Amino acid sequence: MDRAAPHRPWWPDALNPMVGVRKRFTRWLQARLPLSDTTVLTQRNVFILPTGAGWMLALTLLVLLVASINFQLNLGYLLTFLLAGSAVVGMHMCHATLRGLSLHLKPPEPHFLGQSTALEVQLSSERTTQRHSIALAVHGSGHWVWTDVPAQGTATVQVAFAAPHRGLHRVPPLTAETRFPLGTFRVWTVWRPAAEVLVYPAPEPGAPPLPPGEPRAGGTGSAPQQGTGEFEGVRAYRRGDPLQLVVWKKAAQALASGSDALVSRDAQQAQRHELWLDVAHTGLADPEARLSRLAAWVLQADRLGLDYGLRLPGQEIAQGNGPAQRRRCLEALALC
């Protein structure tokens, strides 16, 4: 089972002289790491250093050894070498917990700006014993996700990643580490996946209704409807009409006025008009606000099951509907 928990040293970073050294080493290392969505951890890419507890243990062992030599304490020698042997065994076990582990990043799903996407990482082990207390995080984030990997099995963890702006982003470097079993050593690796994640513009909350439809080329030339939020024409409800064709907004207005008349969208009238989501129809000056409104309109038109197209500067997406059309339009908004 995954366990999310903060993982911080007990001393502040400002007092830790290793922070600057670690950052410079990490930058040097990342510049030399290959891009790959799958990596196998070996002695070449797994690193080990004592933790704060490890340095304290080393100091304690030194004091015990000096005291045992000065006072010729046989039990002191025994305790010193027993603790030292335990530390050496713990160091070997800690390094072996990551060594030989295989990491694979599944293709991340697109998401909207302001939301975090889950980077799904699969950990595979061919070892005949279980691997304990392995943590993964976006490098430098400090938000760790912990898991155990079963013997000759796999485990999957989801690491949260939130992009700072829309567009196509390369997945940031990921860090895997463990301090099992004694916490006296930190074993870690830095991994640079090659995958990219697409971030859509954040849909505008409370966006206005869809723009009016435009007459089809070669159509009757009837005037487009005003922006009431209903692109298609309406007619009286007929028994057997699908519920998704009922104009519930107008039904609510009728009930408020004391009438129970229902109306449905007129598909025949809809055939004489086309819905175009044009950046010029947004009425906004800020480029990002325009894209947010268009994203909200795309979601609204898709939810209503309408045919719609998208017009952007230098790009036009033809009329269509369904998940594929929604994906094409949102991708265009993310990359424009």
Image (cartoon, rainbow, N blue to C red):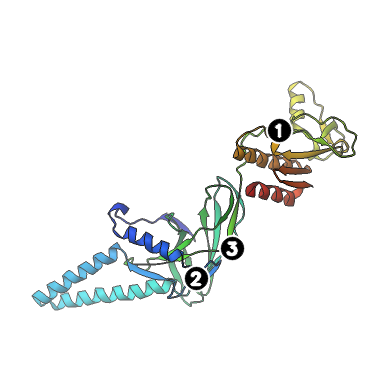
Would you say the residues marked 3 and 1 are in contact, meaning their CB atoms lie under 8 Å apart?
no
Q: Which residue carries the number 1 mark?
A: 209
User: What amino acid is found at the position of numbered circle 1 in the picture?
Assistant: Pro
User: What amino acid is found at the position of numbered circle 2 in the picture?
Assistant: Pro
Please give the name of the residue rendered at 61% of the width and 39% of the height, measured from the top-left corner: 287
Q: Which residue carries the number 2 mark?
A: 150
* Residue placed most toward the observer, 126 or 151: 126
Q: Earlier in the sequence, mark 3 or mark 1?
A: 3
Within 10 Å of disc 2 (Cα), the crowding (few <14, some 14-19, many 20+) is: some
User: Is residue 134 something that shows in the picture?
Assistant: no
Please give the name of the residue rendered at 90% of the width and 34% of the height, measured from the top-left corner: 220
In the rendered image of this protein, does residue 148 appear above or below residue 300? Answer: below
Secondary element at tag 1: loop
Q: Earlier in the sequence, mark 1 or mark 2?
A: 2
* Residue placed most toward the observer, 302 or 286: 286
Horizontal arrangement in the rendering, residue 85 relative to residue 238 (left or right):
left
Q: Which residue carries the number 3 mark?
A: 106
